[in-house]
Image (tube, rainbow, N blue to C red):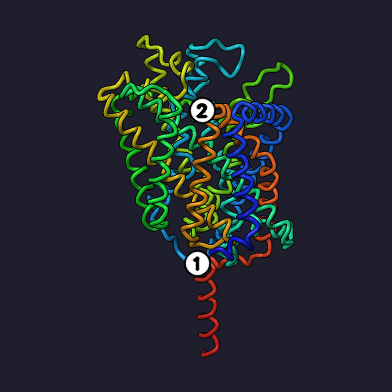
């Protein structure tokens, strides 16, 4: 193991860089938070347009690819079939891709937009504000997020399973960047650093929400000590799970997550304003589809304001920073599926679940504020982490729902971190599909430490800042990855369709009959 690490530039550079950030953040939290804030402001003001354009281009590319003749190509050999059942596959995507973020923002986002609207001319806490809040929330949790994950995942899966190469970001870029070792190591090192920063954002948000939930249920208060304790327990849990491998720990936890999430979803759907939820879902889906291009390319150069930077650009930067991990993970669990199955599965199913989740939880909160005189939006504005638990106050079995939600958040955090240690260890061990436990432990420690330092240095704002700064250079890498996919597919022989094969056999049989006659 020592020899492998001594000669492993990616492992050494990425761990050293992140360890330095941990030390600086712990030693100078105020200065660390201030510097991160300055970088955040510079990035959003000068490159927000770049994030929006890049994500929109990725969506167009993926839809075109799914509809093209290349959609029939399989991520693996022509005879390979999917390794995991559809339910397990979706559960893994749901858990690794956005589960904990959705639980955090499912109520917090629509109620934030309802309280303070995306457009200055619309009055907050009005019917119009409620409608706009749901449409914009659907947009943020729709196909745009998942297009980023799909680009990274598709490139890695194609090379790993179709071409039998390492499952690395640098390998996926070889058709564009070539095989220069220095370039490859630089790309992989940066992918690792961006992944850890993006993941730390999600872990930190989950920890803040767990603390908020514990305060709502048990009156523990919100404190740094409790948040550090949650991180320690989470670290122990995901390291135990990580040691069992992909087939056991992550698979079982993913199924548990999806089952628990669907159970909570069903209960709130039937216990809440069911008809209002269904009408809200239908209307918001229509608003989302009709406003998709406007929202995708919306900037504020004329009237000023920072709403787009604080919401849309933050979301896109967050998922871009997280895309090396999620992309590599969904590539790992998607072996045997066709490109068309992969794109449709990744771009349609998880976003539909997400939008329905927002409609159920956010819709329930909106209905009570509009019709029952509650003040959930004001409470959310005061404390984002309390959003879900404020909504439970208007539902039956509120204590049980809160406890189950805390458990769901915890299992989501463990699954995401478990998956991430596996992928990060693989990325820093030359794409090894079964990385050693030592490498997983190193990344487990560093992820927890980064999340802890960011919380210590400035809470939610520092977490958001970290993901944005790490995402900017990786956006360029994702666009290059898109070109690499196109270049690879143009060289790939298309699989013979069953209809063509049957026609060929009929012609062959007819030719044989002619010869015999």
Residue position marked by numbered label 2 in the rendering: 137
Question: Residue 130, position in %: x, y?
Answer: 48, 17
Residue position marked by numbered label 1 in the rendering: 498
Earlier-in-chain disc, 1 versus 2: 2
> In this rendering, which labeled residue sits more in front, label 1 or label 2?
2
* Pick the front one: 44 or 91: 44
Rendered position, 79 above or below 259: below
Q: Is residue 176 left or right of residue 114?
A: right
Is there a contact, CB below 8 Å, between mark 1 and mark 2? no
Task: Give the spatial CA distance, label 1 vs label 2.
Answer: 42 Å
Dot 1 falls on a residue whose secondary structure is helix
Question: Residue 9, position in %: x, y?
Answer: 65, 58
Q: Residues within 10 Å of mark 1 (few under 14, many from 20)?
A: few
Residue situated furthest front in the rendering: 27
Is residue 64 in view from this perspective? no
Rendered position, 356 above or below 72: above
* Pick the front one: 28 or 481: 28
Rendered position, 511 above or below 217: below
Question: Residue 18, position in %: x, y?
Answer: 60, 44
Task: Look at 45% across and 18% down and name the residue there.
Answer: 380
């Amino acid at each position: 193991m020592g020899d492998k690490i001594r000669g492993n530039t990616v492992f050494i550079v990425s761990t050293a860089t992140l360890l330095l950030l941990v030390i600086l953040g712990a030693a100078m939290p105020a200065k660390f938070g201030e510097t991160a804030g300055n970088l955040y402001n510079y990035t959003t003001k000068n490159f927000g347009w770049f994030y929006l354009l890049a994500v929109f281009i990725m969506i167009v590319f993926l839809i075109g690819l799914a509809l093209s003749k290349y959609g029939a190509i399989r991520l693996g050999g022509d005879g390979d079939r999917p390794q995991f059942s559809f339910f397990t596959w979706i559960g893994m995507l749901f858990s690794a891709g956005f589960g904990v973020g959705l639980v955090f923002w499912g109520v917090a986002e629509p109620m934030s937009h309802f309280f303070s609207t995306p457009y200055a001319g619309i009055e907050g806490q009005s019917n119009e504000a409620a409608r706009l809040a749901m449409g914009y929330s659907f947009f943020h949790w729709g196909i745009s997020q998942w297009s980023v994950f799909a680009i990274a995942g598709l490139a890695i899966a194609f090379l790993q399973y179709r071409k039998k190469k390492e499952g690395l970001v640098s390998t996926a870029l070889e058709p564009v960047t070539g095989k220069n070792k220095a370039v490859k190591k630089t790309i992989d090192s940066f992918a690792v650093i961006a992944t850890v920063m993006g993941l730390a954002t999600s872990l930190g948000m989950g920890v803040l929400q767990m603390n908020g939930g514990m305060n709502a249920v048990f009156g523990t208060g919100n404190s740094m000590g409790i948040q550090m304790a949650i991180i320690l327990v989470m670290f122990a849990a995901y390291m135990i799970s990580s040691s069992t491998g992909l087939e056991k720990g992550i698979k079982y936890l993913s199924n548990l997550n999806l089952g628990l999430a669907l159970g909570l979803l069903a209960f709130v759907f039937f216990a809440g304003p069911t008809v209002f939820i269904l009408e809200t879902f239908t209307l918001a889906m229509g608003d989302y589809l009709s406003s998709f291009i406007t929202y995708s390319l919306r900037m504020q150069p004329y009237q000023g304001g920072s709403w787009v930077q604080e919401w849309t650009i933050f979301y896109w930067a967050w998922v871009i920073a997280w895309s090396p991990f999620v992309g590599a993970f969904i590539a790992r669990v998607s072996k045997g599926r066709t490109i068309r199955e992969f794109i449709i599965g990744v771009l349609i199913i998880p976003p539909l679940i997400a939008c329905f989740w927002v409609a159920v939880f956010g819709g329930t909160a909106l209905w009570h504020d509009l019709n029952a005189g509650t003040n959930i939006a004001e409470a959310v504005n005061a404390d984002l982490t309390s959003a879900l638990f404020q909504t439970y106050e208007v539902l039956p079995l509120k204590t049980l729902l809160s406890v189950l939600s805390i458990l769901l958040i915890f299992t989501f955090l463990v699954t995401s971190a478990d998956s991430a240690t596996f992928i990060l260890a693989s990325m820093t061990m030359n794409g090894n599909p079964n990385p050693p436990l030592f490498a997983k432990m190193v990344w487990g420690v560093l992820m927890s430490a980064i999340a802890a330092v960011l919380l210590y240095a400035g809470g939610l704002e520092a977490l958001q800042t970290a993901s944005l700064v790490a995402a900017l250079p990786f956006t360029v890498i994702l666009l290059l990855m898109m070109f690499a996919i196109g270049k690879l597919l143009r060289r790939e022989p298309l699989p013979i369709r069953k209809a063509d094969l049957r026609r060929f056999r009929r012609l062959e049989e007819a030719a044989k009959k002619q010869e015999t006659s």
